[in-house]
């Protein structure tokens, strides 16, 4: 069995990570997660929303375990990683961001380092009162490598992101909510059930519309304003052309 437990709840897929004792990320678990994303990307009819959660008490997901792998940080004369495996690991964060379905990080406990970067790669983040978020890499003499220095400033602003990354300090749930690192604080008791209900409210909507909305939201962060507006128009036109219900309503109004 892998480190990720996969459960289906209506139109929501719940991925729960468990790696005792502290839920450290590992090579195997990240590559396994990438394989799960590849499968889910082909199952948009069955799965509308994906929720990621931690399966160890007090932890969402902790930093990447690099014990015994000093070769990961070596590059060749062309500036490429000596270890292709490390490049594949870093690509998993991008694959999480790119899967068609909206994704929710359900954080009950510590999300640090790579665990925080997994949460940042999700579309939405919710936490319990026990949620604690941290980019801890600076404390080990390195910087985030899974997109933390790029995604976090876009989420919370450059000033707050600089404080997070340069100090390595922990943000408790209330502060994380205030700065926009998480979207909501849900009750600690039966937290996963609350998170699933939160996700199911999203999953009640049209699957194709959710995918289209996620695509446009991603583009809004990556493109200049006018390019993003043009991209949004293209997405909505393609979506309306492929959605008979919307087309039928439009024709009815016009008649």
Image (cartoon, grey):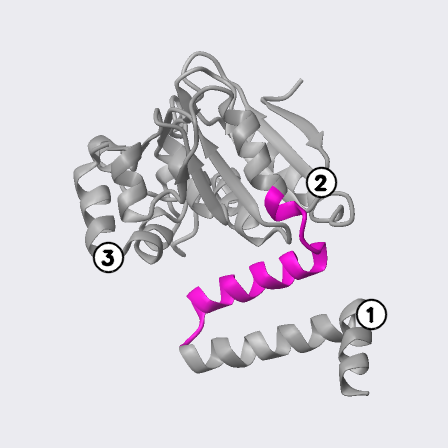
For the question of whether residue 147 can be seen, the reply is yes
- Give residue 230's position: percent from left, percent from top: 54, 81
Residue 30 visible in image: no
Percent coordinates x, y for residue 190 in the rendering: 51, 21
Q: Quadrant of the C terminus?
A: bottom right
Cα distance, mark 1 to mark 3? 43 Å
Disc sitting over residue 121 in the figure:
none
Q: Nearer the viewer, residue 35 or 239?
A: 239
**Magenta stretch, residue numbers:** 201-224
Q: CA distance from mark 2 to mark 1?
A: 22 Å
Which quadrant would the N terminus be assigned to in this image?
top right
Outermost top residue: 21
Asked whether, in this view, residue 78 is left or right of residue 137, the answer is right
Residue 77 x/y as whole percent = 38, 53
Between 123 and 165, which is closer to the camera in this rendering? 123
Q: Disc 3 and disc 2: Cα gap in Å?
A: 36 Å
Q: Which residue is mark 1?
A: 244
State which mark lies toward you, 3 or 2: 2
Residue position for label 3:
158
For the residue pair 163 and 244, the one nearer the viewer reads as 244
Tag nearer the camera, 1 or 3? 1
* Mark earlier in primary sequence (2, 1): 2
At mark 2, the secondary structure is loop
Quadrant of residue 214 within the rendered picture: bottom right
Instruction: Examine the structure image and report whether residue 205 is included in the region drawn in magenta.
Output: yes
Instruction: Check disc 2: other Cα within 10 Å, few if <14, some if 14-19, many if 20+.
Output: some
Q: Name the residue rendered at 35%, 34% in the picture.
A: 113
For mark 1, give the secondary structure. helix
Q: Which residue sits at x=41%, y=76%? A: 224
Residue that carries the numbered disc 2 in the rendered image: 11
In the rendered structure, are the residues bearing label 2 and label 1 in contact, judged by CB atoms less than 8 Å apart?
no
């Amino acid at each position: 069995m892998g480190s990720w437990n996969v459960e289906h709840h209506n139109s929501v897929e719940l991925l729960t990570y468990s790696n005792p004792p502290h839920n450290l990320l590992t090579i195997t678990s990240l590559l396994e997660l990438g394989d799960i994303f590849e499968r889910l990307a082909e199952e948009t009819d069955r799965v509308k929303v994906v929720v990621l959660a931690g399966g160890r008490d007090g932890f969402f997901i902790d930093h990447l375990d690099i014990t015994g792998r000093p070769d990961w940080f070596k590059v060749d004369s062309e500036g490429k990683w000596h270890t292709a495996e490390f490049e594949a690991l870093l690509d998993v964060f991008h694959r999480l961001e790119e899967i068609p379905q909206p994704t929710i990080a359900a954080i009950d406990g510590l999300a640090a380092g790579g665990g925080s970067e997994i949460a940042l790669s999700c579309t939405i983040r919710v936490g319990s009162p026990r949620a604690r978020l941290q980019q801890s890499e600076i404390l080990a003499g390195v910087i985030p490598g899974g997109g933390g220095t790029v995604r976090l400033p876009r989420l919370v602003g450059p000033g707050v992101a600089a404080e997070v990354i340069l100090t390595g300090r922990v943000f408790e749930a209330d502060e994380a909510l205030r700065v926009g690192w998480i979207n909501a604080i849900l009750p600690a008791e039966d937290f996963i059930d609350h998170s699933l209900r939160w996700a199911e409210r999203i999953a009640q909507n049209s699957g194709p519309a959710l995918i289209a909305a996620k695509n446009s939201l991603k583009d809004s962060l990556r493109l200049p304003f006018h390019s993003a507006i043009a991209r949004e128009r293209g997405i909505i036109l393609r979506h309306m052309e492929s959605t008979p219900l919307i087309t039928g309503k439009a024709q009815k109004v016009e008649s």
